[in-house]
Image: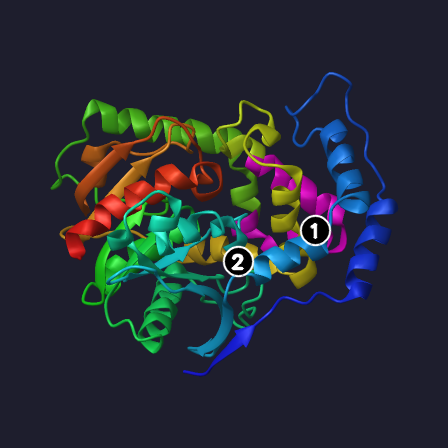
Amino acid sequence: MQIEPFKIAIDDAAIADLKDRLARTRWPDQPFDAGWELGTDIAYLRELVEHWRTRFDWRAQERALNAFPQFRASVGGETIHFLHLRGRGPKPLPLVVTHGWPGSFAEMVKLAPLLADPAAHGGDAADAFDVVVPSLPGYGFSSKPKRRGMSPFQIAALWTELMQGLGYPRFGAQGGDWGSAVSVCLGFKHPAQLLGIHLNFISSSFAPPLSERERPLEPEEQAFLDARSRWFDAEAGYNRIQATKPQTLGYGLNDSPAGLAAWIAEKFRSWMDCGGEIERSLGKDELLTNISIYWFTETISSSFRIYNEVRTQPLRFQSGERVIVPTALAIFPKEIPMPPRKYVERIFDVVQWTEMPRGGHFAALEEPRLLAEDVRRFFRRFR
């Protein structure tokens, strides 16, 4: 496996083009009493776009990201970008941490140092990890797959090859959103390489068998399925279009930075524990750093395709199939509807279940310390 050091270096012309496009945004109308009910509020988006155009300093964010050791590797015909933080402790445990959508590797820049160097952040050096944070194929500075078929199962195979190429025959996995799906696929298809998986989300794409031969649903399990159905009816329009016609959506968002910001910002507001105010949980610069990565790398369209892959290749468990590696769940209260423990235990060997006091879908950004401590606690059993 060929590995090369990598630094982010966006051309000055690309930054100037972004600012020019932002200045020429053609704004739609909005009913005066709509707020966020119809989608991204125009007043907030105007403020965010103006900040992006006049005050946001990409070069400062670029320098901050480049302070992390970054690499690109040729893996399974793809070029995978990743952060690699060597642990500072007596025996660091290798851990691959996977982001989701609409996140990026930048989602993990608060979490990764807490895991790699716990003693520097009030923890125990014995809990150190060698942390690998890849960018999903089609995201950020990883390559865009030229052919269809890059499902979480294929990504899990790439991650196994990547970790073994880095000298880690056995490792742990952590993730939320699509990172959860990839981590589950690692545990399901590559158990010999996995120590355990830690999840802060369970994808609705993973469904246990519920045939007449299985244990009947209990009331709390049925209540979860009902809540998830209501959530999909109210909130999952993005999912349906990204799963069915991702290419059509990609044209507009790849061409309009204001449109891209509207599409992504609304998800952060809806899925964070922020009480409807994004900046209670995430500053404008953090939000725009993530959006800028999509913009400068032109990966918003390719990032959608995983939704279509899962739609055409459902991640369904058959009767008798299980994820046999030990599994931990961290449940954040403002997360998208999560299943109860009994439902999860139908297919997972759950050995740790933590209900967090606060936080939402973007746990690594919102509550990195809570997440880091839960990850440390789970993986102590494997040291």
Q: Is 244 part of what is drawn in magenta?
A: yes
| Marker disc for residue 38 | none
Amino acid type, residue under disc 1 in the picture: Leu
Left or right: 61 with respect to 144? right
Residue at 39 percent of width and 59 percent of height: 152
Of the pair 272 and 60, the residue shown nearer to us: 60
Per the image, the residue denoted by label 1 is 253
Quarter of the image where one finds residue 369:
top left
Quadrant where the C terminus sits is bottom left
Number of disc labels: 2
Residue 109, percent across and down? 49, 51
Quarter of the image where one finds residue 330:
top left
Quarter of the image where one finds residue 154:
bottom left
Residue 70, percent across and down? 51, 67
Residue span colored magenta? 242-268
Main secondary structure found in the magenta portion: helix
Element type at mark 1 = helix
Residue at 29 percent of width and 51 percent of height: 316
Task: Pick whichever of labels 2 and 1 is earlier in the sequence.
Answer: 1
Residue 334, percent across and down? 43, 28
Residue at 53 percent of width and 44 percent of height: 240
Per the image, the residue denoted by label 2 is 305
Residue at 82 percent of width and 51 percent of height: 19
Q: CA distance from mark 2 to mark 1?
A: 14 Å
Quadrant where the N terminus sits is bottom left
Question: Which class describes the residues within 10 Å of circle 2: few (<14), some (14-19), or many (20+)?
Answer: many
Q: Is 251 part of what is drawn in magenta?
A: yes
Amino acid type, residue under disc 2 in the picture: Arg
